[in-house]
Amino acid sequence: MKLKNYFILSSWSLITLFSMVNNALSGPELYSISLEPKWENIELDELKIEQFGCKKWILAGSLTFKKRPEKPENLSTLTFHWQGPRLDSITGSLYKKNPDKPFLPFEDMLISDGTWNKTKQTLTFSFNNIQNLGSLNVFYLTLTIPSTLEELIKSGSFTLEPTGLPTPYKRRARTSHLSLTFADIPTSNKGIITAKNKETLPSTSS
């Protein structure tokens, strides 16, 4: 009888241990996503102003992925759902950022130009090259918008959808409200870089 009870207790202990390990490995504390709204003007010279027309080029925010497990995670798409007044169209681009350097929207840092879905009010970025997520990955979202719509867009927000995220991050996105909310963020007049010529910065579509 004692031997039987011992095996029952041992089995229960092993099940509990495996459950604790599994929860720890998949827990949100080991995988995190953070979104930070910014809304900073990217300065344009006359060449870029002519190219963009009367539109403004805005650094809208950053998206940071962090994880502790060494197992690689792959990212192929990102989708943002617009929350605000209905938009007919909006142009966005996604860049990767070197965590040790200031953000510079150079061509070789461009990952994807977004596709706007007017019906769903979503901005989707599909990557030709799958992004391998390491311990720290930072992406920057830029928007090209008409000056007349700046205040309207600043009154809304972009929410990150779980669709397309690796499973551990998908769990995190489903349990947290991850969004870029632009209200109360003052517009920066300094910009973050001056586009001096068309060779230094990408030719973002209008």
Image (cartoon, helix red, strand yellow):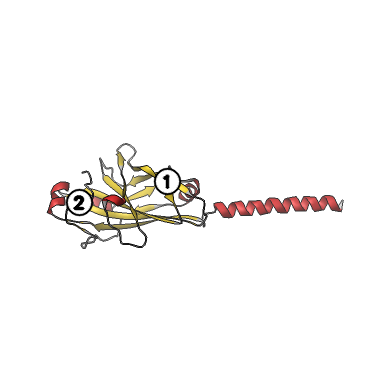
Q: Which mark is residue 199?
A: 2
User: Taking 31 as reference, is 18 left or right?
Assistant: right
* Percent coordinates x, y for residue 161 in the rendering: 41, 45
| Furthest residue toward top | 119
What separation in Å lies between label 1 and label 2 (alpha carbons)? Answer: 29 Å
Q: Position of residue 72 (x, y in %)?
A: 49, 50
> Which one is in front in this view, the residue at disc 1 or the one at disc 2?
2
- Which x, y percent locates residue 198? 18, 50
Residue 90 makes an appearance in the image: yes
Q: What crowding class fits label 2: few (fewer than 14 Cα within 10 Å), some (14-19), or many (20 or more)?
A: few
Kind of residue indicated by mark 1: Leu
Residue 75 circle label: 1
Q: Which residue occupies 69% across, 50% down?
A: 15
Residue drawn at x 16%, y 51% is: 48
CB contact under 8 Å: marks 1 and 2 = no
The residue lying toward the viewer, choosing from 87 and 197, is: 197
Given residues 95 and 62, the one toward you in this image is 95
